[in-house]
Image (tube, grey):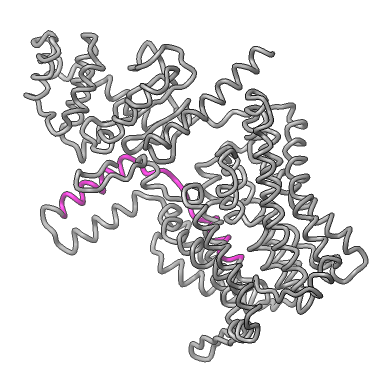
Amino acid sequence: MAESEGVSFSGRTAWARTLQTPLREFLQTEAGGAAVLLAGAVAALVWINVDSGSYESLWHTTLSIRLGGGEVSHDLRNWVNRGLMTFFFFVIGLEARREFDMGELRERRRAALPLVAALGAMVTPVAIYLLFNAGRSSAHGWGTAMSTDTAFALGMLALLSARAPARLRTFILTLSVVDDLVALVVIATVYTAHVDVTALLAALGFFGAILVARAAGTRRGIVYAALGVATWVALDRSGVDPVVVGLAMGLLTYAYPAGRSELETASERFRLFREQPTPELASAARESVEAAISPNELLAHRYHPWTSYVIVPLFALANAGIVINGSFLAHAFTSPITLGILVGYVVGKPLGLFGGTSLVSVVSGGRVQPPVGWLARVGGGTIAGIGVTVSLLIGSLAFHGAQLQEAKLGVLSAAVLASALTWLVFHASDLLPADARRRALLGPSQRLVDLAVAVDPERDHLRGPLGAPITLVEYGDFECPYCGQAEGVVRELLGDFNDLDYVWRHLPLNDVHPHAQLAAEAAEAAAAQGAFWEMHDLLMDNQDALGPRDLFGYASQLGLDAERFREELRGHAHATRVASDIEGADFSNVSGTPTFFINGRRHLGAYDVATLTRAVQAARERAELERTRALAG
């Protein structure tokens, strides 16, 4: 929904402004999150090597919580690993659910690709680890070589290479859905030594109550928080690592786009509050605003910054400390634990990911294709060799003493080497000819199409060369201040790209913009006289003057048949045409303005010149690749 002029311009589509899921947060702030995580790991290494006594003393400090006759007691490291990390997996669960409800996995046949690729990228490193540790007690620690640290991997990818296609970042995050699910199953089963059946049954009972509350449509966070804490305590008592509670609750949390009817209700209740600011109306307005946004989006927006910038770096600080000296390094780099983890991640991850995606493509007869090219898949595999967070968590469960230090060294060394290899892979793309580089990075697959109503040159209003390979569609509102801000960006793009079609479609937000509907009908009345774009430009340049008298004045200024224009406007002759655009917006789950689509794909990022230019250039490269392939075929 567009806001009033008093709200500062954010430079993001309405979709991106209201849908702050971990995916978009990772793609926008991943470099910062990775930097904080890296700082936590470095701080741990420096601290333990300067004063190992204080480091270990702090993290072994016991913290107990007593309530009546019950008590939960852990040292600080365990409170971080078992307590705070529950929120990390909760955010991962939210993103996993969003992918199935609204993301790349909403088309279920596409789920086979990340499923097989993720399993390949987990099984292959485990097999390599077991080869190094066959017949040894250390073979039990195979889970340490399994999981990718998605946030750290995405952050390092952003820091290391601007050449990596944006779709690779999305693909890696999609893989993490399977990766983290499998990792938590392994934690809950393989690395659970003793199980208290009574406590486990109690945990299942509390979780059943969560399912009942969800089925009843309860949206009160306090209910889920209380049941979630009870489930966590019961699992902790049972011996099963309680972090699984976070992922399970995240997976249960629906994700859906804000509906226009809900947004209109929220707007109406806020209007009532504005007219009569009472506590009752304030509460009603707040509830209607929250009801318009899915719980998934609200919770992800609330918790993702905490997990990225506080919890995960704190986990690194608590777990990445290793006392480093010459004798330790000499011994560790000959240890099967260190070598198994290092080779498993650096060699096994790219082999497993590349092999898994290739297998799905072959078995499906080419119907399911990887979302990126072969070189990007290799780079995705190398960056997946960063396994800090979950690997250290499993390592702390599987090993103790010197073996744990060796495992930590393997994990951290693999992260460093994986980063270096990723940099080399993407910089090697510069050695390829332009067409070969596009194929190597972008690949053959088609993205999902989000635009429900295809562009029709006979009906839509187009600006630019007919049949251009790039089509930018905007659902807009002539009274929306964000659309006014975006208009300058669109005009600059049209000036910079001679192969870009621009399409305007109407989405008047009548509940907040009283003149938007009539302005849209005025643009259609002008279109009936062959002057749509002239009227469009006048309306966008005069957003604060869209009353009936203003519209009649613009018609006269453009030399239109004033009487015909006036009659059509008064009789709402073009209301049906505007309504058809609104219906198309509903089919495409568009609820706010401006919302952009580039070649049928919703643009979720900012809409400043630089961001939209990159998105258009990526669409152009894809179009050129498809044209080259068509000519070759």
Figure check: 310 above or below 193: above
How would you classify the magenta stretch by its main secondary structure?
A: helix
Q: Residue 317, image x and y in percent?
A: 58, 72
- Given residues 193 and 376, the one toward you in this image is 376
The residue sitting at 9% across, 11% down in the picture is: 562
The residue sitting at 70% across, 72% down in the picture is: 396
| Magenta span includes 263 | yes
Figure check: 370 above or below 623: below
Location of residue 108 (image quadrant): top right
Q: Read off the magenta span.
A: 244-273
| Magenta span includes 189 | no
Figure check: 352 above or below 290: above
Q: Residue 216, image x and y in percent?
A: 44, 58
Q: Is residue 359 left or right of residue 152?
A: right
- Given residues 352 and 508, the one toward you in this image is 352
Any part of residue 112 in sight: no
The residue sitting at 63% across, 29% down in the picture is: 445
- Residue extending farthest to the right is 135
- Given residues 308 and 247, the one toward you in this image is 308
Q: Residue 497, image x and y in percent?
A: 42, 21
The residue sitting at 57% across, 77% down in the picture is: 79
Any part of residue 195 in sight: yes
- Residue extending farthest to the left is 549
Location of residue 220 (image quadrant): bottom left
